Every structure is written in structure tokens, then in C-alpha cells.
Image (spheres, rainbow, N blue to C red):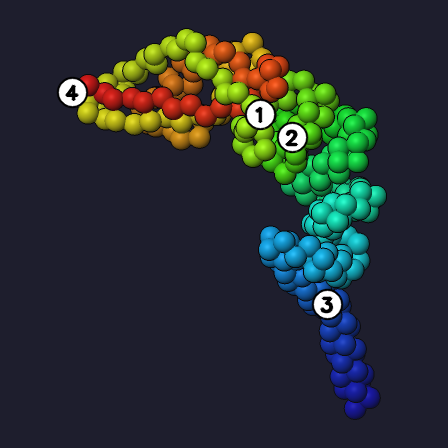
Amino acid sequence: MAKSTRVRLVSLLALLFAMTALAPGRARADVQTDVQEELEKAQKLYSAGNYRAACEAYQRAHELAQGKSSPSLIGLSGCYAQAKDEEKSLAAARLALAVAATPDERTKAATTLVHALLAAHRDQEASDVLQSLRKQGMTEDEIRQEVLSGVLSEGSEEDARRLLRLDPNMPLRIQGELESRLSRPQVLHTVKPETPWEARQHPGFYGTVIVEATIDTQGNVSSVRVLKEQPYGLTESAVKAVKRWRFKPATLDGKPVTVYYVLTVKFQIGI
């Protein structure tokens, strides 16, 4: 009888231990859900221009996550920037980078921090952040396409000028506030792409390859990113041809600048 009682007692203790061990997991899941809900609410408020309410929602998400939510801090930095509170915007951005848990979060936090530093006229500190990203293994193309392009997409014309002082070869996108100040590159020389043998086996085929070319200050194509592919080797043929095109470079306030420029190459296989 005593042995049976001990067995039941041990089983009961094991059950209680298991329930205790599982409870924190459920609590963490609940907290993560609450954080995500606050983030979604904040993002909607921010998009609607209700920055004060968005800031409050981001703050709640930040507190629920016990200061470990990079997206909450990125959002707070943006809200403070809208309120022209540069110091709070910078502090939130720095903390966002410090607690970022994934490569995507680190990229977004770095973009936010560089943007905040430029807005505060702290160009050298922005340069230091970029240098730290290089030391962490981020390539120049990644820095330009993921961090600096993000700053430009959200920043002002003045931000663009500061970025060009940090990186004179930084490619600009012809959009937003910059569109009225940037002259577009002009084609000076094109090269007709070859029609691959495989494509010639499909008479009547028509297709367009779309690429985003990086055109430097000399009017040369320094890199090509494919936006729309075509089969039968046509994509590769188009890229090879576009790399040999020559342009009159784009200019910003009369000075040559590097830009991203979308180009189309059409193919029509004769019958």
C-alpha cells in the first residue's frame, strides 16, 4: 500500500513538473502573439499617418518583448523621426541594431540607423556604421542595394547628397524627390543581342527580357540584375549585350552620378 502511494506521488510530481516546464513556453508564445498584434496595429497607424498612436503601439510591443524586439525599435525610431526628436530616434535605432536577431533585422536596423544619423547631420557616424557592416562581411553591393537604397527610398534629396559624399559611386534610383533633379542616362550605343541556337529552334517566339542596369559616372554598365527572364538562352544573351551598351551618364544638379536604370531587350524569332 505504501509502495502504491509512493508510485502515485512520484507520478503526480512528474505531472506537476511537466506542467510547470510547459507553462513558460505557452507564456512565451502568448507574449510573441501579443507583440506581433501590437506591431501590426502600429504599422497600420503609421501608414495612416497617425504617428502618435503608432508610437504608443510600438512602445507597447517594445515593453511586451522586454526590449528585445528589433522591429518595435525600428518603428519607434521612425515615429520619433516624424516627431523631429532626433536623439530618441537615434537611441531607438542603435538599440534596434544591437538586439537584431536575424540578417534581415540587422539590415533593416542598419538602414534605420544610417537614416537617423544622416537626419541628425552625423555623417561621420553614418560612415562608421557602414564600415562596421563591411567588417561583419557585408559586401559593397549588399550595402548599396540593401542599406543605402533603403535610406534613399525613405529619405530626402539632402540625404542623397550626404550619401554621395559618403560613397560617391552609390547608385541612385530615379524616383521620389530625386526624380525631378536627376537627368536620366541617354543611350549612345547599343549592341544587338545574338539569337542563341536553341531559340532559333522556336520560330515565331516573341519575348522581352527586362533588366536593371547600374550605369556609372562614365556611362558604362557596371552590373546587370535580371527582372524578367526568357527561355532558350535569351536572358543570358540579353545580359551579355546590355553590358556593352554605352550611355551619356545621368546627372544630379549637373554632376554625373551612378544610377539604376531599367532596360528592356525584345526578341522575335523569325519564321
Q: Secondary structure at mark 3?
A: helix
Tag shown at residue 157: 2
Relative horizontal placement of residue 265, taking residue 86 as reference (left or right): left
For the residues labelled 3 and 4, the Cα–Cα distance comes to 67 Å
Circle 1 sits in a helix, a strand or a loop, which is it?
A: loop
Find out whether the residues at labels 2 and 1 contact each other: C-beta distance under 8 Å.
Answer: yes
Label 3 is placed on what type of residue? Ala
Q: Amino acid at mark 4?
A: Ile
Q: Find numbered disc 2 in the image and state the secondary structure of the residue it sits on.
A: helix
| Image quadrant occupied by the C terminus | top left
- From mark 2 to mark 1, how far is it between C-alphas? 9 Å
Residue 216's x, y, as percent? 56, 15
Residue 205 falls left or right of residue 133: left
Give the residue at mark 1: 181
- Of the two numbered discs 2 and 3 on the same chain, state the one appearing first in sequence: 3
Q: Label 3: how many residues lie within 10 Å, few (<14), some (14-19) or many (20+)?
A: few
Task: Compare marks 3 and 1 and give the one earlier in the sequence.
Answer: 3
Q: Amino acid at mark 2?
A: Glu
Which residue position is annotated with label 4? 271
